[in-house]
Amino acid sequence: MTPDSLFCMDALEQTGIMVVPGSGFGQVQGTNHFRITNLVNSTEEMNTALDRLKNFTEKLMSDYK
């Protein structure tokens, strides 16, 4: 599994937020990213989702160190 795919699967499992691996869109080899689509109804809901994704990423990076 590519690193970006693993990130997306873990993010979904741990936050309930679905993001799509960049490897499905022809990303430059050696880079990793994801795509997200905003389907929420309010800015407040989007900010909440982004906060959850931020907390997930920060924890992932602290565990990686």
Image (cartoon, rainbow, N blue to C red):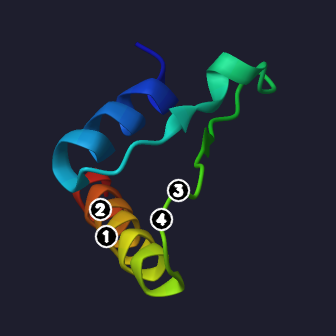
* Viewer-nearest residue: 64 or 57: 57
Eyeballing the image, is 1 above or below 61? Answer: above
In this view of the protein, which residue sits in the foreground, 36 or 58?
36
Q: Which residue is mark 4?
A: 40
Q: Are marks 3 and 4 in contact (CB under 8 Å)?
A: yes
Position of residue 54 in the picture relative to residue 20 (left or right): left
- Please tell me the numbered disc located at residue 32: none
4 vs 1, front mark = 4
Residue sitting at 31 percent across and 58 percent down? 65
Q: Percent position (x, y) of residue 8? A: 40, 36
Residue type for callout 2? Phe
Q: Residue furthest front?
A: 41
Residue 11 in the image: state x and y as whole percent: 31, 46
| Element carrying mark 2 | helix
Confirm or deny contact between disc 1 and disc 2 (CB under 8 A).
yes
Q: Secondary structure at mark 1?
A: helix
